[in-house]
Amino acid sequence: MRFISIGCVVFVLTFTSAGAQDRKLDSLRRAVQTEQAAGNRYRTSFSLSHIGFYYNSLKRDDSAFYYYKLSLSPRFKSANDTLNASSLNALGTLLQRKGMLDSAIYYFSDALYLYQQHGKRGNAMAVEINLAMVYKEIGLYEEALDTLLNALDYLERRPPGAYLIIGYNTQGNICLKTRDYQDALVSFNNAVHAARAAGIDAYIAPLLNNKGETFLRLHRYDSALSCLIRAENIKRNARDTKALGKTLNLLGETYMALGDERRATSLLQEALAIHTAADSRIDEIIVLHNLIELQLRQRRYAEAGELLDRAERLARAGRAPDYLRQLLEQRLALYRAMHPNDLTVKIVEELLMVKDSLLNKDKAQSLQALNIQYKTRQNLEQLAKMGQEAIQHQQWINRLIGLAMGVTIVVIVIYLLYRSSQQNKRKAETLFKELNHRVKNNLQILSSVLSLQSQNVKDEDALLAIKSSESRVNAMALIHKKLYRDDNNRTIDMKEYVEELGDFLVHTYGFTTDRLQLRIQCDAVSIDVDKAIPIGLILNELVSNALKYAYDKHPAPALEIRLQEPRAGEVRIDVRDNGVGMGPQKTREGSGSFGLKMVNMLIKELKGKVDVETQAGTAYRIVLPL
């Protein structure tokens, strides 16, 4: 349950009467006309967004949306990206509230990009939490957690405050959605600790509510009751009647699970009265659903029918299809209980099973399409960010890295096209032969250019960027070199490949056999080129990271690389160094450098598993199916 939403907060206004509101609006409109006449685009855009916030504070979403959009129109848009990002974030919040989640994501993403471009990390963090909430609502839980971890990485390094509490709470709610209940408890506990450390007691009761719901889903009813009763006491003492209704509903559901139907009925009826008085229709439907379930258990079918009629009217009037579906399922259960031998019930149940299966399939396809769409956008933004960082060093470095990335993408695209044409074996073999010939030559030329260029570079960051690009290109070039030797063979001798790659990387990063103890142990494994390329890139990144970062002032550096086939159809890769190690935060999926993100992506694509140890150095253990 999300108990706080984060919107765009730019101005703080207080409106005490309708007359004061009208005077404020007239003042803002005159300011727009004055600044527009003076040609001050910043002040004009500022005043328009101010009017948007004014309407937003009055819950007049359509008017707020109009003025925020007007402040970003070509006629009025300011050159101040921070002001524009604030309006974009506000538009995303309005669209999220309207349920237009796809559009909300695009506005939040644009706001996030502008804040990041200008180093506004605090503002960017707030937008990341907004984005995580939207991803959670549409079912993209992996993206939600990935985005939220970026915000928490920033927040955890600062004194605890409201945003950290909200971040942990959102993380817990995502885990509730994915049924990762133990992780949800950890997040909610972190939120409680942060609230107490920050001295913000207002968050304690909602967090206890969320913990109680988590314990309820885990069937740990004693713990659920402990949390929910504490939340109830806090809300009753604070006279927070509206929030009290949600706690009472969860308490009623808990007592219902424990078989105490008398107490469950009393609590649910009190919760229903609170939500009815507040005209909170969705909460009212949720409580009615529990009461109907209670009546069905007690075989009080007439009372269950009356409650169903009431709940269905609310669900239809409020256009709440998910809740209406649950109520119709209860209607079917009521009819089945009253007519146990009716053949119609069995036919309807079978029809619903088939329909649910089809709907789930459509939903999965839809979510997959959205997933691809959002990942593509995120990748483009990441590439743009990398380009900006490279420009800050030197212009020509940006062109070299762009060229390396471009060649990599072209190789992967051509390779994927090759895989799709395997049905025509003769044509595929011809294409593959020509591909290897051309790619080998292009990659060798590019590797040579990067190697020559690195000799003239003094900036350490630029030199590392060039060497990273050179090692990635070389990792692919080695494979194509081996394929070109034997036109009729699609497999790579990994023992020979790993030894060559290891020697190349050690030499590239300035190590010698006297300074670095390199141990390579590989079984005689031959791997198809489809998997040899991504495995080569994974090895390249892990070994390069060790050589670049692990051995700063280390007296006896050692690096061990193993590639073994413990059983048929499976390969295990171990890369271990005895260096300074990595923090646990850096080993999370999606964290760290572009190279580590690429490693995680390739392991996922290969359907593999990875385990990382960060004690006494860093050790990666990767298991991949062949």
Image (cartoon, rainbow, N blue to C red):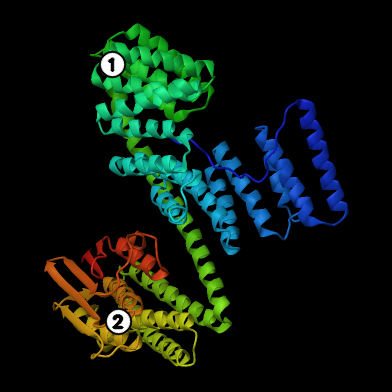
Residue at left 43%, top 47%?
Answer: 366
Of the 4 image quadrants, the one containing the N terminus is top left
The answer to whether residue 279 shows anywhere in this view is yes
Mark 2 to mark 1 CA distance (whole Å): 65 Å
Towards the viewer: 490 or 32 = 32
Residue corresponding to mark 1: 336
Q: State which quadrant residue 543 falls in.
A: bottom left
* Kind of residue at badge 1: Arg
Q: Residue 321: percent from the left, percent from the top? A: 46, 29
* Kind of residue at badge 2: Ile
Against 80, residue 619 (above or below) is below
Quick one: SS at disc 1? helix
Q: In the drawing, does residue 344 fall left or right of residue 165?
A: left
Q: In the drawing, does residue 240 fall left or right of residue 64?
A: left
Of the 4 image quadrants, the one containing the C terminus is bottom left
Against 285, residue 448 (above or below) is below
Q: Nearer the viewer, mark 2 or mark 1?
A: 2
Q: Residue 260: percent from the left, percent from the top? A: 26, 15
Residue corresponding to mark 2: 479
Quick one: SS at disc 2? helix
Q: Residue 289: percent from the left, percent from the top? A: 38, 20
- The mark found on residue 396 in the picture is none
Which of the two labelled residues, at mark 2 and mark 1, occupies the earlier sequence position? 1
Disc 2 crowd, CA 10 A, few/some/many (<14, 14-19, 20+): many
Q: Residue 480: percent from the left, percent from the top? A: 32, 83
Towards the viewer: 290 or 225 = 225
Q: Residue furthest left?
A: 567
